[in-house]
Image (tube, rainbow, N blue to C red):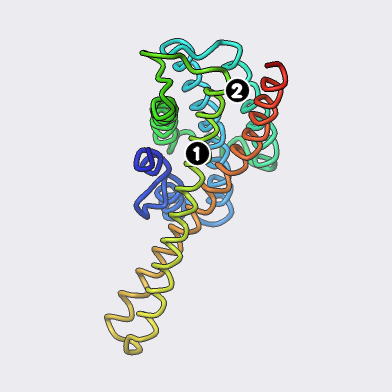
Amino acid sequence: MGSAVSSIFGGGGSGGILGAVGGIVGGIFGGPIGAMIGQAIGGMLQQAIGSGANSAVDTLVKEHGMPKFLGEEVKSTIGQVINQLTSQSQQGVSHEAQGAAQQNFGGAVKQWESDFSNQIVQGVLDQLRSQGTGSSKGSKPSGGGWLQAIASVMGSALGAKAKEMVNLSQQINDASAAKSAAKSGSEEQSKQADEFNKLMTQFQATSQEYNYLNSVFTTALKGLGEALGTMARKQ
């Protein structure tokens, strides 16, 4: 499951969707409007996290036997988190910036949302199978089993993104050392400087992506933990 989770969260040092989008925004718009469009894209990504998670839960309920009341609990918890975060992150973003973000990057974010949803479904099913409670054969998972599987997928996703940040940090250190070691004004120094700047952009984008996911998942995990506790007390 680790590779599946890593792929959707922009693994392999790519900087994820924010890395690609951030570079395009800076190249096309630049200045304050570019920053505002970047902020609008961040809001779109936050919404995509919520919508993708909701779509995944709907699939688990309709096709894999997750109890409907649990699905509604998860969707409600994540929905509250997303609404709170977007109300904060989108303050001061103009309608023009939001429109430009949607026009230029709406398709990419929508694809991210779809892939994100599919990976959540696959990750949860993998977790249930590893527990010996697959949704199609054998014993059915309990309500707690479903919530634990979702929580595990969220935790693994954050871990994969954090690991990517550590790897990028090491690459930045290596590029910085190579730039310093190269002869001043040489082609090699210019090459290493370009690589350093590229890695810094990827790291910043990856950090922002991690922050978005962390804000959603940590709060959602707290809500799911409380739900698990309530279920345990009723047993």
> Element at badge 2?
helix
Look at the image and tell me whether residue 110 can be seen.
no
- Give residue 75's position: percent from left, percent from top: 59, 21
Q: Amino acid at mark 2?
A: Val
Instruction: Please name the residue shown 61% across and 12% down the image.
Output: 69
* Between marks 1 and 2 in the image, the one whose residue lies nearer the viewer: 2
Look at the image and tell me whether residue 135 can be seen.
yes
Mark 1 — residue?
101
- Give residue 55's position: percent from left, percent from top: 48, 21
Sequence-wise, the earlier of marks 1 and 2 is 2
- Give residue 50's position: percent from left, percent from top: 55, 29
Mark 1 closeness class: few <14, some 14–19, many ≥20 residues within 10 Å: many
Q: Quadrant of the N terminus?
A: top left
Mark 2 closeness class: few <14, some 14–19, many ≥20 residues within 10 Å: many
Q: Is residue 58 above or below residue 203?
A: above
Residue at the left extreme of this rendering: 187
